[in-house]
Amino acid sequence: MEFKDYYTILGVERTATADDIKGAYRKLARKYHPDVSKEAGAEARFKEIGEAYEVLKDPEKRAAYDQLGTGWRAGQEFTPPPDWAAGFEFAPGRFSTADAAEFSDFFSSLFGNFTRQADVHHSHGEDRHAKIVIPLEDAFHGATRTITLRAPRLDSEGRVVLRDHTLSVRIPKGIRDSQLIRLAGQGAPGSGGASSGDLYLEVHFDPHSVYRVEGHDLSLTLPIAPWEAALGATVKAPTPTGVVEVKIPAGSQSGQKLRLKGRGIPGEPSGDLYLVLDVVVPAADTERAQQLYRTMAQELAFNPRRTLGV
């Protein structure tokens, strides 16, 4: 998808105050409103202006958007980093589901998970949402972690500043990627003595050096030698709960998967661990090794491209 520079769309600097942003929006909205504008493409421009204002008027969305940095230009191909908003507290969006449908894929990719509530006012405090990133190991053992969330607000000059909010959070054993942890009463305070809202933490795993997460299953690439693949062998393989011995069937190929049942993320039922075989060819970096390869080439008469007809 294409990156959208909301500051350029509204014609304001990144240091603009809330009043600057509001004034720019009102001026452009009057100019491009479809009911009055004669400009070509006025309706599309009006929607784009409204989307930019929805982000930049909201201290939380604006602060998170600013974390993407200044290196992006409008129109560039863009994919949001998986943990781009980790640590930010968000209140639900103050617009209806119909309004949200008017926004671009770019907006939805950044804020879709935080804009599911229609514009309904309640006396109790608003629920808030945040993303946190934890090690995969926490899903196997559980943990208690201290996290610091950032809640943006406007200062006296209308500029966005961040306040820190530190919490102790229990990570339950068996937590899944994208699962929510609810912290009752940790959202926005209510009015008139009403109860506070809740804080929902959307959990994501730190990228692991060995394992890949696929729902409640895990996978890893297991290197094997050509003779282990051809003849079969019993080799050692790591799992999150310890090293195990695995039988490699004779005639195995790269890309073949072996399933270790119940070795994935714990739960009811537990996930599985898939070993993706990768046949690794030894380097021909000595005369002896080169001679062995020449012998194989002569005696095996093997053509790996036979199925291609060449």
Image (cartoon, grey):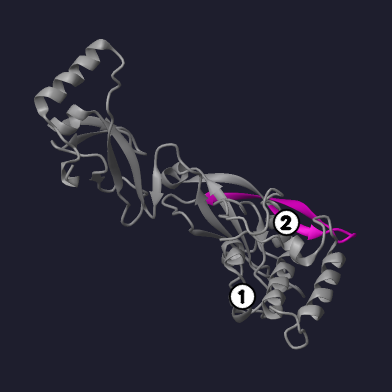
Image quarter (top left, top right, bottom left or bottom right) of the C terminus: top left
Quarter of the view holding residue 239: top left
Q: Residues within 10 Å of mark 2 (few under 14, many from 20)?
A: many
**Is 279 left, or right, of 300 in this rendering?**
right
Q: Which of marks 1 and 2 is nearer the N terminus?
A: 2
From the viewer's perspective, is residue 7 above or below residue 279? below
From this viewpoint, which residue is outermost toward the front? 310
- Percent position (x, y) of residue 131? 58, 55
The residue shown at (67%, 76%) is 44
Residue nearer the viewer, 255 or 76: 76
Q: Give the range drawn in magenta.
A: 150-170
User: Element at badge 1?
Assistant: helix
Q: Which residue is denoted by mark 1 in the rendering?
A: 100
Separation of residues labelled 1 and 2 (CA atoms): 20 Å
Q: In which quarter of the image is the N terminus?
A: bottom right
State the residue position of label 2: 63
Using the rendered image of the protein, determine whether residue 158 is visible from the camera's viewpoint: yes
- Residue 204 image point, x, y percent: 51, 51
Q: Which amino acid does label 1 sit on?
A: Ala
Is 28 or 221 nearer to us in this picture? 28
Which of 72 and 89 lies nearest the eye of the viewer?
Answer: 72
Going by the numbered disc 2, the residue's amino acid type is: Ala
Q: Is the magenta stretch mostly helix, strand or loop?
A: strand
Pick whichever, 305 or 252, lies toward us.
Answer: 305
- Any magenta on residue 145? no
Q: Can residue 123 be seen in this view?
A: no
Residue 130, which numbered label?
none
- Residue at image point 53% right, 50% down: 170
Q: Which residue lies furthest to the right in this view?
A: 157
x and y percentages locating residue 114 in the rendered image? 60, 66
